[in-house]
Amino acid sequence: MIKKLAKSIREYKKPSIITMILMVGEVLIECLIPIIIANLVNKIAASEETGLEMGYLLKTGLLLVGLAILSLGCGGLAAFTCAKASAGFAKNLRHDLFTRIQGFSFNNIDKFSTSSLVTRLTTDVNNVQMSYMMIIRTAIRSPLMFVTAIVMAYIMGGALATTFVVIVPILIFGLFFIARKAMPAFRRVFKKYDKLNESIEENVRAMRVVKGFSREQYETKKFTTAAGDICKDFTKAERIVALNGPVMQLCMYINMIFVLIVGSNLTISSKGADINVGQISAMLTYGMQILMSLMMLSMIYVMITISLESMKRICEVLDEESSLHNPENPIYNVEDGSIEFSDVDFKYSHRAEKASLSGVNLTIKSGMTVGVIGGTGSGKSSLTQLIPRLYDVSGGCVKVGGIDVREYDIKTLRDSVAMVLQKNQLFSGTIKENLRWGNENATNEEMIEACVLAQADEFIKTFPDGYDTYIEQGGTNVSGGQKQRLCIARALLKKPKILILDDSTSAVDTKTDAFIREGFKQYIPETTKIIIAQRIASVKDADMIIVMENGCVSAVGNHDELMQNSDIYREVYEQQIGGGDFDE
């Protein structure tokens, strides 16, 4: 896991190594200063007998100032390089995660909820960033300071340093016992973050529905409960971790009292032969450094343990292999828009008990207009999602241009297919920027032409800024019908060999729907057009109409043939005519 995450360090290895070197320098300087101060204290104590040269005092003072500045410089520079390294590592890790997600098939994405992926890209990466910052800085400084300070304490204090043999194990036990107790609460928090983000995302996306049903209080209560659970776990964990301070203070004062009492007695009884005032001063300083190092190590332990859960969640995404792969020698050219389904079976998951599609056999010639109708759950969308290889078939094969879709380069295949969904997505940006998703090099004239054919040009011109009108995230400042027409125009700019409309004119009136279909005949006559619809008016004039039922092809034919041969088609037709959906 650590090896996998370490791959995201990349160009930030240099500042990471520099940080660790600077930490070594800072520790050595800080451990050297007490020795110099101890010698100075001893010189001052003996000055009554031997006298004290001002030159020595000034020289020692300047040396201490210089060492302090050098230590401060190492620490300050280490802070800069550490921040650069950790922020850069987090940037690379987010990039690697995002790139990995972009390569997922729909089958992979189905395994992770949107809120969970957002949490992993934000909160989890932030936790790992904090851990990395502590590892290259504090995790180098604290153990090195601990070991160096103990060695120097024995050199300076001799037998007096045995106090650490008692105090250090007590402190280690106390601090790590506290960290261990806090861990379960911290681990629970991350799973609850997913639920909190899911609640926020769901509420924001469905704001109109929430207000339409006056469910604000219910949603607020649901959010408050999720936030309260996180607060409760964090409060419990932080309350336990807060005991670090008192335990640290207790051990520090016990050490100071022991050193002062025992050290003073030894100094007086031996008249400075066994231990002197300077050594007692150094022992107090080293004692503080040892105890502070242990406290920082316990905080590192807490942070890394918290981050372990985040690391696991990040690695789950990084380890996820896409269920779709390019073949060894992919084909980079789609000959035409012909489509063939041969004994196709399909399940969304290998654990699914029921197949979404069973025994589908279809032949669609290039340039045909094909209608697909059927009830909810009949397999209409599943059928079309196999064409651009958003999913792979469970059995049989799908051919485009006479070649199995699994033999194509995935990007080449998808560039040849344009899909317009009922709930298609517009992105924050201008109308022009959204249209250029279909063709990034499209001219203004080409965009206007596509919008005219998609019946979008008329309403765009009513906007004060026309094609430069800013679209809010998700297209919330345009109506459902306007959004669908913009998405159709975007697809037309792609000039695909296959165009799939998945109930994408459901929000427009039948007259506009008819104009759009007429535009297809003029603008993309050679493109194979597949129209999934609930209204028979949208598919009545198609060259071929496919009737789906329970994942199977119930009937195939044109309107007249199906009126004679398909009970399902005829029943839907008569119901819609009775309801006045369209005039024949």
Image (spheres, helix red, strand yellow):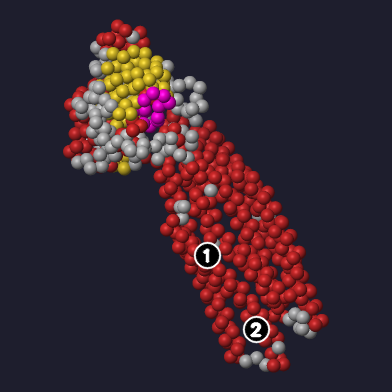
Across and down, in percent, residue 440 comes to 25, 42
Residue 139 versus residue 486: which sits nearer the camera? 139
72 on left or right of 409: right
Q: Amino acid at mark 1?
A: Met
Q: In front: 31, or 421?
A: 31
Give how far apart the Cα atoms at labels 1 and 2 are. Answer: 31 Å
The answer to which of 328 and 443 lies nearer the viewer is: 328
Mark 2 crowdedness (10 Å alpha carbons): few <14, some 14-19, many ≥20: some
- The residue at 53%/32% (across/down) is 218
Please name the predominant secondary structure of the magenta segment in the image. Answer: loop
Which residue bears the numbered disc 2? 40
Residue drawn at x 76%, y 73% as measured from the top left: 159
Q: Is residue 386 magenta-colored?
A: yes
Q: Which mark is residue 20?
A: 1
Quadrant of the drawing holding the C terminus: top left
Where residue 556 appears, as percent x and y from the top left, is 31, 14
Question: Residue 382 is drawn in which quadrant?
Answer: top left
Check if residue 94 falls in the magenta segment. no
